[in-house]
Amino acid sequence: MNALELLALVELGGYPNFVPLYKRHGYQVEMVNSVRKAQAWLKKHQPQVVVAEFYVDPQFRDRLSNLESLLATLQRYDSGAKVIVFIDHHYLQRLEGVKQRYPIFGALEFPIQEAALDEMLSRITG
């Protein structure tokens, strides 16, 4: 049986290292710091979970957020990965626009509470 994989995309950070929590749930963790690196990793892997930050940059011309390229890649590979988003409450409305096009399992607002993330991972792993 293949190991359960979790991709953690940490572009901005500023919150605790949740790798020990991910490992307690049985995941082999891959951490990357850019969408481009995440997309390259996804060419060879099908994670069960993707955890990523959501942010908006005024320089994005053709998309609402940093995540759309990553979500499109997941959709292309039909991975079935559950996506958990870390988000500032100011961007919740923008996330709704993204959710109309891509599946998001859940969103956690900053500051991220480990107990809330633990509960969300428990819902995924059963």
Image (spheres, grey):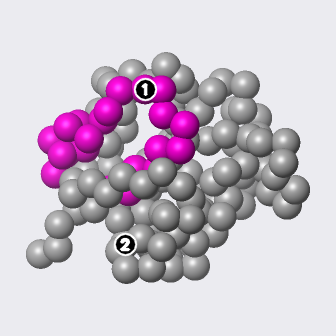
Q: What residue did someone put label 2 on?
A: 46
Q: Is residue 7 left or right of residue 92?
A: left
Indicate left or right for 46 with 92 as reference: left
| Residue segment shown in magenta | 6-26
- Name the kind of residue labelled 2 in the image: Gln
Q: Residue at x 15, y 41 (%)?
A: 24
Q: Residue at x 42, y 71 (%)?
A: 41
* Residue 71: in magenta span: no
- Quick one: label 1, few (<14), some, or many (20+) residues within 10 Å? few
Foreground tag (1 vs 2)? 1
Give the left or right position of residue 98, taking residue 123 as reference: right
Q: Is there CB contact under 8 Å for labels 1 and 2? A: no
Q: Is 124 in front, or is 114? A: 114
Q: Residue at the location (34% across, 62% down)?
A: 48
- 86 relative to 46, above or below: above
Q: Secondary structure at mark 2?
A: loop
- The amino acid beneath tag 1 is Tyr
Kind of element beneath mark 1: loop
Counting from the top left corner in percent of width and height, residue 71 is at 60, 62
Q: Position of residue 124 (x, y in %)?
A: 32, 49
Write down the residue under mark 1: 15
Name the quadrant of the N terminus: bottom left
